[in-house]
Image (cartoon, helix red, strand yellow):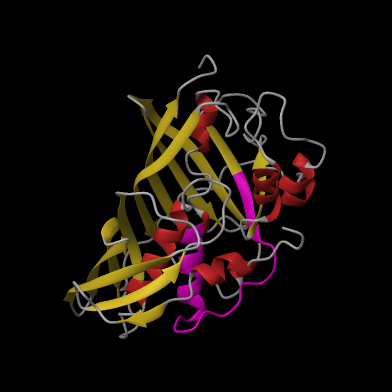
Amino acid sequence: MTHPTSEVVTNALALEPVAAQHFDVAFTATTQPCPWPKAYGGDMVAQAAAAAMLTVTDGKTMHSMHSYFMRPVDIGAPVTYEVEVLRDGRGYATRQVRAFQNGKPAYTCLVGFAAGEDGGRYAASAPADVPAPDTLPSSAAYLADREPGDGSTMTGESKAYWSGGRSFDMRHVPGPVYLEVDGGSAPHQALWVKPFDALRPVDGLTDSQRDLAALAYVCDYTILEPVLRVLDLPWAQPGLVTASLDHAMWFHRPPAPGALDGWLLYAQEAVAADSGRGVGLGRFFTPDGEHLATVVQEGMIRATSGGH
């Protein structure tokens, strides 16, 4: 991508109403380009979040999502999101969203909404002594002098995608895991993430709702990386195949207006790896340490060659 832009994520969040075939309300959305055989899983999470939020009109805020990925989804193709209104209570609401493509269910989730109320307050602490983002190389800078080949599966297309095709500038601590596990195989890492430019408006969503959906979108790119790191498996390892299996996300407090246009710290750790699966945990923090959201994901991690 010649000019990196955040338009990728806001294009993903553009939903069109259609007639419901299974549940109460339905929308279509289009998955975004990527260099892999099937679409990026964050498309489904974020599009389902947007679909669910469009059906909640009384001011409640999304507080959790619990997702399962059942089938791969085609790239650049429409997906239909059917929303079932399970409950609308005074304090909480619940939606089920199911995504269909080619006549088959591909993804499903439950989404919770809350009106909010007074109560106690606690927030996890951000990791200490993380270098500032402007002291770290961008993915584009890190990969600038690296070429396809040399025993890796990186292509020109995947290099361009990692460098500037994902809507967000991503800066790794201690280092990326694109071509090798840079910085060692400890079971934790952190990233600074920021859209390449200010997020654009999305029809039907408030800016606050768009920002929650954008968090849901970006979280899936790297959540398995601490597991790959501890297993010494870079993304470009020949024979490596990964896939999202299930995913949970909790939104603890809404980002301040404009916060998603700046840097966020995404602190991650490996929880477990066995039997061809791995679990990663991540937390999003503002630069001043406010804990916004928590992510847990289990993914398939299959390494068929390379000696690992």
Q: Is residue 208 magenta?
A: yes
Vertical placement of 77 versus 301: above or below?
A: below
Q: Quadrant of the N terminus?
A: bottom right
**Which segment did they paint magenta?**
191-217
Q: Is residue 61 visible?
A: no
- Residue lying furthest right in this view? 145
Q: Where residue 285 sits: x, y (%)? A: 54, 55
Tell whether 141 sits left or right of 74.
Answer: right
Q: Nearer the viewer, residue 177 or 157?
A: 157
Residue at point 69% right, 68% down? Answer: 197
Q: Where residue 243 sits: x, y (%)? A: 41, 41
Q: Nearer the viewer, residue 170 or 58?
A: 170
Q: Is residue 2 visible?
A: yes
Tell whether 127 sits left or right of 1.
Answer: left
Tell whether 110 sits left or right of 38.
Answer: left
- Residue lying furthest front in this view? 102
Vertical placement of 122 versus 257: above or below?
A: above
- Residue lying furthest top in this view? 307
Tell whether 259 sits left or right of 114.
Answer: right
Residue at point 58% right, 59% down? Answer: 286
